[in-house]
Image (spheres, helix red, strand yellow):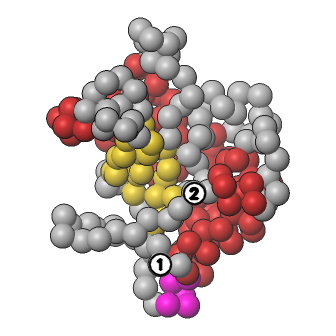
Amino acid sequence: MRAFTFTRNDFLVLDGGMGTQLQAAGMQPGEIPEARSILTPEIVTTIHENYLQAGAQVVYANTFGLNRLKLKDSPYTVEEVAKASLQAARTACDNVAAQTGIPRYVALDLGPTGRLLKPVGDLGFEECVDIYAQVIRAAAPLCDLIAIETMTDPYEMKAAVLAAKENCDLPILATVAVDENGRLLSGLEVEGVVALL
């Protein structure tokens, strides 16, 4: 891990989509993208390196959908996939840093669980926190920051942030997905997200 610092006056260049790049590299519909870190780690590392060489300072590990719900029918554990995904990202950062002399950083990427929280869905808040906590405990020793992204439910985002704060002391980035009116799926506006955080 590297010491990651960021001030409000800094610009931070993040990488691009992993899933689309994995599809372009041959991943088939229905495959678990995060499992590609175990099955084809060299492809995942190359994708990260390409983003870094294009100017990204931070790569998001191939962990966007990593959680025990998604892996329940998979032969892999959360811990195995987290380790492989973070190692692929770290290898890419180390390779590019060796070429350029400029440090690059690895973010644990946490996206939505794929389930809706109660009362709309069937996932309890504490269980949601625990799902994220498992991933964070497995990955935090291998990354430089936590990136919670593309959240549409503010309470799921809150669960991910709480899990991160309770299980590591890494910096946290959080982003949401809004509709054309600037609202989350729940109807909350960005100002409400900021207040919640």
In the picture of the structure, the residue carrying the numbered disc 2 is 17
64 horizontally vs 179: left or right: right
- Point out residue 24 in the picture as x, y percentages from the top left corner: 75, 60
Residue drawn at x 50%, y 65% is 15
Q: State the quadrant of the C terminus.
A: top left
| Above or below, comparing residue 187 to residue 84 in the picture | above
- Please state which of residues 137 and 124 is positioned toward the viewer in this rendering: 124
- Residue 197 visible in the snapshot: no
Front in this rendered view, residue 167 or 190: 190
**In the rendered image of this protein, does residue 99 appear above or below residue 166?**
below
User: The magenta stretch spans which residues?
Assistant: 96-100
Q: Is residue 194 magenta?
A: no
Q: Locate residue 154 relative to residue 123 in the image: left or right.
A: left
Tell me where residue 133 appears, x and y as whole percent.
46, 35
Q: Secondary structure at mark 2?
A: loop
* Kind of residue at badge 1: Gly
Image-based side of 20 in relation to 93, left or right: right
User: Residue 105 in the image: x percent, y percent?
Assistant: 45, 69
Q: Give the main secondary structure of the magenta stretch.
A: helix
Quadrant housing residue 103? bottom left
Q: Which residue is mark 1?
A: 55
